[in-house]
Image (cartoon, helix red, strand yellow):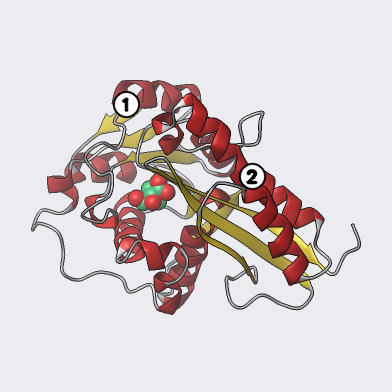
């Protein structure tokens, strides 16, 4: 496995790659969710690139950019074990040589809803770094987790709107045995907060099981949230447009547990009598 930090070394390594280049973009602090993405990517790409970059553009002024976990050595071990060919781990100066760019990719109206309502500018920061990394790595296929469902939806929309020549593959959320969605931010939780955090997954499961109508879904999910105060608990269409009366839908939740913000979501089928 080759590890590069500069654009020139990335280009040199990528120019030697044969076949289809796959990329898994990460901010490091890798866990089993990332390992699953890498495994999925390994099966579908001839040359596998992992990127490790804590992107300052997607953090708001009061968010956790400084304290975001940085665990490069352990991350490289996971990449090696999953058969990654090339790791690109740039500094902010390499990614943004002119400083933070004033030109960014506009995520459109969906960028101001759900996560975007609580984190202004977040998705412009995500789409900007994702498009830069797609160009720099020359990937033909890129893999993203469904846990960040709005991110995945917006990346797919960007690729379509800008005619980018890359396939975007969504990979189902990986959970701890007790149902907590895996996240690099879970390590911030105290033991008591971790127990509280389980309410998010319980709420989603209760919602999915009560899927006769949208109102039933939301009522069942709200009941399970108990003491956890949600930033939002919303039912939407699979493309995150307005929720349909029946058929496929997505239930999304975000909540702050202690000082940690957690998100989760699930597929729901409305109109079933399950
Ligand atoms: O999902 C993440 O870890 C980040 O948002 C991403 C896609 C690596 C962009 O910084």
Mark 2–mark 1 contact, CB under 8 Å?
no
Label 2 secondary element:
helix
Question: What is the number of the mark on residue 71?
Answer: 1
Q: Residue at x 79, y 74 (%)?
A: 246
Q: What is the x, y in percent for residue 164?
A: 42, 68
The quadrant in which the C terminus is found is bottom right
Q: In the image, is residue 35 above or below residue 171?
A: above
Q: What is the x, y in percent for residue 2?
A: 32, 28
Residue to which mark 2 is pinned: 201
Q: Residue at x 88, y 64 (%)?
A: 272
**Left or right: 170 as drawn, with respect to 74:** right
Instruction: Tell how many labels.
Output: 2
Quarter of image, res 247:
bottom right
Disc on the earlier residue, 2 or 1: 1
The quadrant in which the N terminus is found is top left
**Left or right: 37 as drawn, with respect to 67:** right
């Amino acid at each position: 496995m080759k590890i590069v930090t500069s654009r020139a070394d990335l280009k040199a390594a990528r120019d030697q790659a044969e076949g289809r280049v796959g990329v898994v973009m990460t901010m490091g602090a890798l866990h089993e969710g990332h390992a699953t993405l890498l495994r999925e990517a390994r099966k579908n790409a001839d040359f596998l690139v992992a990127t490790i970059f804590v992107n300052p553009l997607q953090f708001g002024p009061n968010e956790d950019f400084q304290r975001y976990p940085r665990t490069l050595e352990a991350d490289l071990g996971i990449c090696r074990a999953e058969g990654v060919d090339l790791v690109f781990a740039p500094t902010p100066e390499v990614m943004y040589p002119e400083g933070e760019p004033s030109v960014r990719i506009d995520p459109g109206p969906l960028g101001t809803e759900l996560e975007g309502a609580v984190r202004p500018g977040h998705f412009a920061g995500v789409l900007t770094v994702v498009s830069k990394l797609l160009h720099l790595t020359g990937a033909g296929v890129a893999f993203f987790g469904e846990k960040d469902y709005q991110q995945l939806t917006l990346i797919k929309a960007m690729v379509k709107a800008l005619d980018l020549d890359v396939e975007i593959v969504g990979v189902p959320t990986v959970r701890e045995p007790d149902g907590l969605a895996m996240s690099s931010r879970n390590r911030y939780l105290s033991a008591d907060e971790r127990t509280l955090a389980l309410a998010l997954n319980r709420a989603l499961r209760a919602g999915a099981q009560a899927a006769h109508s949208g109102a039933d879904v939301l009522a069942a999910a709200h009941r399970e949230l108990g003491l956890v105060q949600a930033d939002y608990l919303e039912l939407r269409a699979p493309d995150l447009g307005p929720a349909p009366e029946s058929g496929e839908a997505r239930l999304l939740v975000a909540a702050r547990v202690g000082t940690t913000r957690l998100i989760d979501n699930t597929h729901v089928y409305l109109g079933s009598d399950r």
